Image: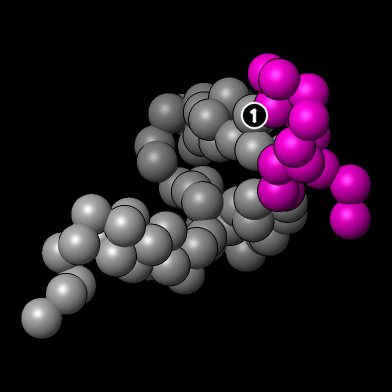
Amino acid sequence: MPGAKNDSGDEDLPDIPVVCTKCDTRTTVPFPDVEDAVARHNEGVHDGEAAAEVDPAVMDRLADFVAEDLGLLEE
């Protein structure tokens, strides 16, 4: 699966799963475009209501990685 390049152009960035429970839809968006895509969907389809979001499972996993990296999960 092709991803977007970061600013240095040397590393592939992942496509991010985005879900909208009100529309019952799911898609993937290139990492650099996620914020704009979610905002555009919510503004255009839901009058600004925060209906679309990054898949919550991805956000939970990201939070785990950050907590681990910061040493918050160490005993």
Magenta-span inclusion, residue 8:
yes
Compared to 2, does 61 lie above or below?
below
Q: Left or right: where does residue 61 sit relative to residue 36? A: left
Q: Which residue was labeled with disc 1?
A: 32
x, y percentage for residue 38? 56, 36
Q: In the image, what residue occupies the spot 39% across and 37% down?
A: 49
| Most frequent secondary structure within the magenta stretch | loop
What segment is highlighted magenta in the picture? Answer: 1-15
The quadrant where residue 61 appears: bottom left
Q: Position of residue 72 (x, y in %)?
A: 15, 64
- Residue 53, compared with residue 21, is above or below; it is above
Q: Is residue 8 above or below residue 15?
A: above
Q: Which residue: 78% across, 23% down?
A: 9
Say which amino acid is labelled 1: Pro
21 or 32, which lies in front? 32
Q: Quadrant of the C terminus?
A: bottom left
